Image (tube, grey):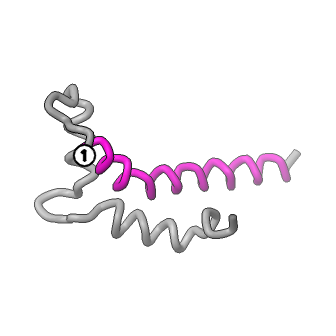
Amino acid sequence: MQILNDWKLIGILCLTLGLAPFVPEPHIWGKLRWVFGGGVGMSTMDWLDLLFHGLPWLLLIRLAFVEFFKKMKSNV
């Protein structure tokens, strides 16, 4: 699927959905701090919310790996 390899779309998703709401802090950052603090009191909805806001960042990491290995393969 070509849409999963579009840098612009994934960048926009990371900056909007991945960081929203922006005030008082990006939502994903608050969820990650909660998880790294032990995740005490997190409900199923909180975990799904983390997945929802984290998916654009996972797609970005995936795309970076795909491009990196594509360049490594072409250099060999």
Q: Residue at x 64, y 64 (%)?
A: 5
Figure quadrant of residue 16? bottom left
- Give the main secondary structure of the magenta stretch: helix
Residue hosting label 1: 45
Q: Quadrant of the N terminus?
A: bottom right
Identify the image quadrant of the C terminus. Answer: top right
Query: Badge 1, how many Cα within 10 Å: few under 14, some, many 20+?
Result: few
Q: Amino acid at mark 1?
A: Met
Q: Position of residue 64 (x, y in %)?
A: 60, 53
Q: Residue at the spot x=17%, y=57% of the render?
A: 25
The local secondary structure at tag 1 comes to helix
Image side of residue 39 versus residue 9, left or right: left
Measuring 83% from the left and 47% from the top, which residue is drawn there? 73
Residue 28 x, y percent position in the rendering: 28, 51
The image shows residue 1, relative to residue 8, as above or below, that is: above
**Side of 17 where 21 appears, left or right:** left
Q: Is residue 39 above or below residue 19?
A: above
The residues colored magenta run 45-74
| Residue at figure coordinates x 61%, y 63% from the top left | 4
Seen from this angle, which residue lies furthest left?
24
